[in-house]
Image (cartoon, grey):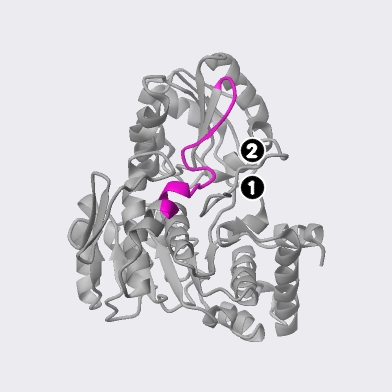
């Protein structure tokens, strides 16, 4: 299978993100020799911050001399970028080889038409296989949607289970209360496990603690067992000082603290402070408060729900100062667009609503109306490229443009803002 054939095969699969039941996933992996059992894992679930936390935890483990794989989703640049090895996307040829092996395994199972492997299942199995073939010492795996029925929930929680945070999302699938959503996400952890690392919970703390108590779950909590104070991350009675977090935004401090705690819990021994400093300083995560050089400035962020959008808005002054950007926005139709626009609109000079290539992208006219209801000057431009051009014109060369609302929109617009000859990529260690 060539890289082009692999992409065509993946893009032709059912994109349903969660199909109830894990039997099919177990059968596919068994046919491949259960590659996910070849290395210990950190399993990351939560509403926001999963990809950044995954990247940072993998960075810290890599900095300690482990050959570390990582699996993230969705991608911003290309399908192969969902699987990373020591911080670099796997080579297209190796991606194609893994996808080809998974396709053959799926075909060999003779699955019925109504029981076909989904796109996410194939990508997840290919990632597990790639990492096994690369002989990784450890892997950090980001869940896709929820937890209980997510294709990654074949890891039995991994050596460490991470819950980044909780907010209402995908309520049609996960439940319409924080307690229900917490239950779905924490379902990846085995009953009685004390291997959890839990991030900032805010108002959700009581709900999460009730779910954990009901299942006998325990572990480390941000603010109780580990913390990020000033430039020091404190964890397990140890202090890692002089910390600078590569990705901008105050919310990344929580992600960094959770990542260090997860790496410490995984290692079972004190970490090297110098390695922790270097890892967090050098890590880069595409599509998370990512600034692309040029005039006007373009900032890209994958905030895709109300909680993520609020965190993005709070972080904008860290990057843009007092400048109010012109926002290019697309969201998926299952998101709370009104709440997202209510968070975003006050921080923007104008909003240009558009439609990503994803089939569930919301109508730009609906988004523009929501932005206007929140007090913003807004217009709808259906084509993402034209929307970006319009936003650039409105911002002027000395202004700023913010692309947000969906990682799918970021993927659509990346070729226009980041030339292929110098792609920005996730990086766990410096190129030097």
Specify whether residue 166 is in view: no
The secondary structure type at the circle numbered 2 is: helix
Percent coordinates x, y for residue 189 in the rendering: 36, 75
Q: Is residue 129 left or right of residue 12?
A: left
Foreground of the two, 302 or 296: 296
- Quadrant of the rendered image containing residue 251: top left
Specify whether residue 80 is in view: yes
Q: Which residue is mark 2?
A: 414
Percent coordinates x, y for residue 31 in the rendering: 66, 85
- Quadrant of the rendered image containing residue 105: bottom right
Q: Is residue 163 left or right of residue 91?
A: left
Dot 1, how many residues are within 10 Å of its Cα: few (below 14), some (14-19), or many (20+)?
A: many
Q: Which residues are magenta?
A: 278-296
Q: Is residue 225 left or right of residue 416?
A: left
N-terminal-most mark, 1 or 2: 1
Q: Residue at x 37, y 56 (%)?
A: 274
Find residue 5 and name its label: none
Percent coordinates x, y for residue 65 in the rendering: 48, 68
Q: Pointer 1 and pointer 2: residues touching (CB < 8 Å)? A: yes
Q: Distance from label 1 to label 2 (Cα)?
A: 7 Å
Q: Is residue 294 magenta?
A: yes
Q: Residue at x 74, y 83 (%)?
A: 108
Q: Is residue 164 left or right of residue 90?
A: left
Q: Which residue is mark 1?
A: 77
Percent coordinates x, y for residue 256 in the rendering: 36, 53
Q: Residue at x 56, y 20 (%)?
A: 296
Q: Residue at x 47, y 58 (%)?
A: 59
């Amino acid at each position: 299978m060539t890289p082009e054939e692999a992409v065509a095969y993946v893009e032709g699969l059912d994109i349903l993100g969660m199909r109830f039941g894990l039997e099919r996933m177990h059968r596919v992996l068994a046919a491949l020799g259960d590659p996910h059992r070849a290395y210990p894992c950190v399993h990351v679930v939560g509403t926001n911050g999963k990809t950044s936390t995954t990247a940072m935890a993998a960075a810290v483990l890599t900095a300690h001399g482990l050959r570390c794989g990582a699996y993230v989703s969705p991608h911003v640049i290309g399908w192969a970028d969902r699987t990373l090895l020591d911080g670099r996307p796997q080579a297209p040829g190796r991606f194609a080889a893994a996808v080809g092996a998974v396709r053959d395994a799926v075909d060999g199972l003779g699955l019925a038409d109504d029981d076909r492997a989904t796109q996410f299942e194939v990508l997840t199995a290919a990632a597990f296989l790639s990492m096994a073939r690369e002989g990784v010492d450890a892997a950090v795996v980001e869940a896709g949607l929820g937890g209980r029925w997510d294709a990654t929930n074949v890891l039995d929680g991994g050596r460490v289970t991470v819950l980044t945070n909780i907010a209402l999302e995908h309520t049609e699938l996960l439940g319409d209360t924080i307690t229900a959503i917490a239950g779905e996400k924490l379902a990846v952890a085995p009953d009685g496990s004390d291997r959890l690392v839990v991030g900032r919970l805010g108002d959700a703390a009581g709900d999460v603690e009730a779910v954990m108590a009901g299942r006998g779950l325990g572990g480390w909590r941000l603010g109780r067992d580990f913390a990020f104070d000033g430039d020091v991350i404190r964890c397990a009675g140890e202090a890692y000082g002089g910390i600078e977090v590569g990705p901008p935004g105050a919310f990344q401090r929580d992600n960094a603290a959770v990542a260090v705690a997860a790496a410490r819990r995984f290692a079972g021994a004190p970490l090297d402070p110098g390695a922790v400093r270097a890892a967090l300083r050098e890590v880069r995560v595409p599509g998370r408060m990512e600034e692309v050089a040029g005039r006007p400035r373009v900032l890209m962020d994958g905030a895709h729900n109300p909680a993520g959008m609020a965190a993005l808005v709070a972080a904008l002054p860290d990057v843009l100062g007092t400048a109010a950007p012109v926002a290019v926005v697309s969201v998926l139709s299952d998101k709370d667009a009104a709440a997202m626009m209510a968070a975003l609109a006050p921080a923007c000079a104008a909003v240009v609503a558009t439609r990503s290539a994803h089939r569930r992208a919301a109508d730009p006219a609906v988004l523009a109306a929501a932005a206007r209801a929140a007090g913003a000057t807004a217009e709808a431009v259906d084509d993402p490229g034209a929307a970006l051009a319009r936003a650039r014109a409105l911002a002027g060369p000395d202004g700023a443009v913010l692309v947000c609302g969906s990682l799918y929109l970021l993927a659509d617009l990346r070729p226009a803002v980041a030339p292929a000859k110098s792609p920005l990529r996730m990086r766990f260690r410096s190129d030097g």
